[in-house]
Amino acid sequence: MPRPITEHFAKVLKAPLCNPMWSWGAVRDDGAVFLRCWDDEIKKGRALLGSSYDHGHHGGVERRKHIKLIEAGAKGYVVVLTAVDKNASPRSIGAYNPDCVFLLDDIQHHDDDTITGRMKQRVAIGDIA
């Protein structure tokens, strides 16, 4: 059983979440950005990173800052999560792969107000520098 996601971000990725209750990602000291994404929100290798509907949520405000950092050249990575119940609101994390992340690039803002990023390649945790 993997460690809790907050511990994974803090101890393994070295990017502690600002607020474990609502943070959707974090920035490491070297500027690398790590984002959480639900597995059922990945379509054709593109991860749903946010939408205009997230504006009123603290996690959405933080997420937009993280996306801007990636667009400005920061390395971006995705930790893929599986929900206990994908229809629940809010969702609870059922599982995630503690051994890898996905490198992000090609951030796109779509007409339906969603933001996606291409999951360029799988990266082993030990290879993240």
Image (tube, grey):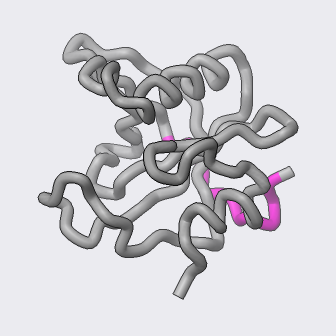
Q: Which residue is painted at 70% across and 38% down in the image? A: 27
Q: Give the number of marks.
A: 0
> Eyeballing the image, is 104 above or below 82?
above
Residue 116 visible at all? no
Span colored in magenta: 119-128
Residue 55 visible at all? yes
Q: Is residue 122 magenta?
A: yes
Residue 65 lies left or right of residue 94; in this view the side is right
Q: Which residue is painted at 59% across and 17% down in the image? A: 68
- The residue positioned farthest toward the bottom in the image shown: 1
Tell me where residue 103 appears, x and y as whole percent.
62, 45
Q: Is residue 73 magenta?
A: no
- The residue positioned farthest toward the left in the image shown: 87
> Eyeballing the image, is 98 above or below 23?
below
Tell me where residue 120 appears, x and y as whole percent.
57, 42
The foreground one among 20 and 35 is: 20
The foreground one among 22 and 80 is: 22
Q: Which residue is painted at 59% across and 78% down in the image? A: 3
Tell me where residue 69 appears, x and y as whole percent.
66, 21
Tell me where residue 84 appears, x and y as whole percent.
26, 72
The quarter of the picture where residue 44 lies is top left
Q: Which residue is painted at 62% across and 42% down in the image? A: 18
Give the main secondary structure of the magenta stretch: strand
